[in-house]
Image: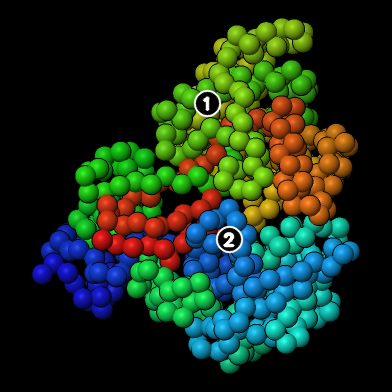
Amino acid sequence: MKHLKTTLLASALLLPLAAPAVLAETPEGVLVVAQNIDDIVAIDPAQAYEFTSGELVTNLYDRLVQYDAEDTTVLAAGLASEWVTDPDAKTITFTLRDGASFASGNPVTAEDVVYSFSRVIKLNLTPAFILTQLGWNADNIGEMVTGDGNTVTVKYAGDFSPAFVLNVLAARPASIVDSKLVQENEVDGDMGNAWLNANAAGSGPFTLQRYAAGQMVRMQANSTYFNGAPKIDSVIIRHVAESATQQLLLEQGDVDLARNMTPDQVASLDSGEIKVDTFPQAAVHFLSFNQKTESLTPPAVWEAARYLVDYKGMTDTIIKGQMDVHQAFWPKGFPGSYDETPFSYDPEKAKSILSEAGIETPITVSLDVINAAPFTDMAQSLQASFADAGINFEILPGTGSQVITKYRERSHEAMLLYWGPDFMDPHSNAKAFAYNSDNSDDNYAATTTWRNAWAVPEEMNKRTMAALSESDADARLDMYRELQKDVQAESPIVIMFQAAYQVAMNEGVSGYVNGATSDFVFYRLVEKE
């Protein structure tokens, strides 16, 4: 038999890779994943902020409301079965689901919800800012979140749409922990933080069986999960840093999924036994012009630039499988996205736009770019295509930290970068691309608008804030689509692509869901033939 016993496989996966020994098939009911997981710093949902830790939190914990594997675009009931917003849109009252329980067997109660939110605010670790947007702090959290019986009342201070608040509460730090279990493992007032960085206390579709930092994660199906037990018995995520080793393990049948293979490796796979699924991701890639550079301030330069990007040429070659054409600030696949792509490579039109506006060429512009693939390749493509209209880029490669530091200092001229939302609400990106109420140098803002010194028209600023507070959910999404349309046409930020993510897997694997962010990686629907 080629099949190994599950327990033996779990042990074998911890051993260093040497020359391949006996070829193996993964056990029935066990999904084995090869993935680079060395980015994990913390798995406590009050602290977890890395990509892989986000995936774990999503599979181990629930939130009051959440996006689920069955449709990652729909905000659905989680531990709350229903909720009601007060007429003044300042309070949401949640009714907890009957019969939900944690992996420990403890029932999910209102006290757990209150404790979980309070814990995030009081620990005040990296992702806490997502919840503090609601006006919560260590002094008022006891008044802002209260529980009574099977209901939880959430208050918020700010002129926010209820949809925005719900999306905040669907974010990672709003995960509900088993307060009894966590408090039993508290040490020196850490609210269980050390223990939760090696264990889990959730109610999600999986329970944490083992976590060995930098080595492996093993999750077991939660048979009592309120949304139905996962279709797979367990998931083993084995740390494999090298993409070539991931390919080897997949081709040998030692793993079912390979998560970090390069496009070249993906193209070389045997399509008869291995398939590749491509998933749109949340990050949007853009070219932007600093408005402190006089030659880049005319709107005609921005307009011409949109016709000087060889969108198809890049997606057919250097970024094939890694990015798709997308020209708006909110990613496709998210509610409220604007998916029209009106611009294509047309240097003659670009030259005409510049000529009619009286723009003298050539224009020489420095272009900062991260010194790594595919960014340097993209920069070279832009250099070639923009030269066709007399805009000459001088490429300045640097490390990620160097490039981002210049961006934050507003000391660049042109910048090739990418941006992703902190949580699944269009305001997360609208604030970055369509809002800048104070463009002064001493008013630092973590937005693309401020970093490019673009003084957003006051009318657009007002529309961005109006969308944040719009109570009608459909009308609100329409407002964001209009904002995207206007930013797409009339800003010094040229949005070009949306990231894509390729996952190679055994032909017999189905049901794997990899949504647009790491918070939307789901294993509960996976099946193996």
Residue visible at 62% across and 59% down?
75
Residue nearest the observer in this picture, 397 or 90: 90
In the picture, measured across the screen, residue 447 lies left or right of residue 1, that is right
**In which image quadrant can residue 235 be found?**
bottom left
In the rendered image, residue 45, in percent from the top left (x then y), is placed at 59, 71
In the rendered image, residue 269, in percent from the top left (x then y), is placed at 26, 43
Q: Please, is residue 219 above or below residue 248 in the view?
A: below
Q: CA distance from mark 2 to mark 1?
A: 31 Å
In the picture, measured across the screen, residue 269 lies left or right of residue 388, that is left
Residue 313 seen in this snapshot: yes
In the rendered image, residue 457, in percent from the top left (x then y), is placed at 85, 34
Residue nearest the observer in this picture, 124 or 276: 276
**In which image quadrant can residue 292 be found?**
top right
Residue visible at 46% across and 62% down?
522
Contact check, label 2 and label 1, Cβ < 8 Å: no
Question: In the structure shown, which secondary structural element does the residue marked by tag 1 occupy?
Answer: helix
Residue visible at 74% across and 57% down?
164
Residue pointed to by mark 1: 311
Residue visible at 49% across and 60% down?
69
Residue pointed to by mark 2: 67
Q: Please, is residue 176 above or below residue 420 in the view?
A: below
Residue type, mark 2 in image: Tyr
Residue 215 seen in this snapshot: no
Residue type, mark 1 in image: Tyr
Residue found farthest to the bottom: 184
Question: In the structure shown, which secondary structural element does the residue marked by tag 2 occupy?
Answer: strand
**Sequence-earlier tag: 2 or 1:** 2
Q: Please, is residue 228 above or below residue 335 in the view?
A: below
Q: Please, is residue 294 above or below residue 478 in the view?
A: above
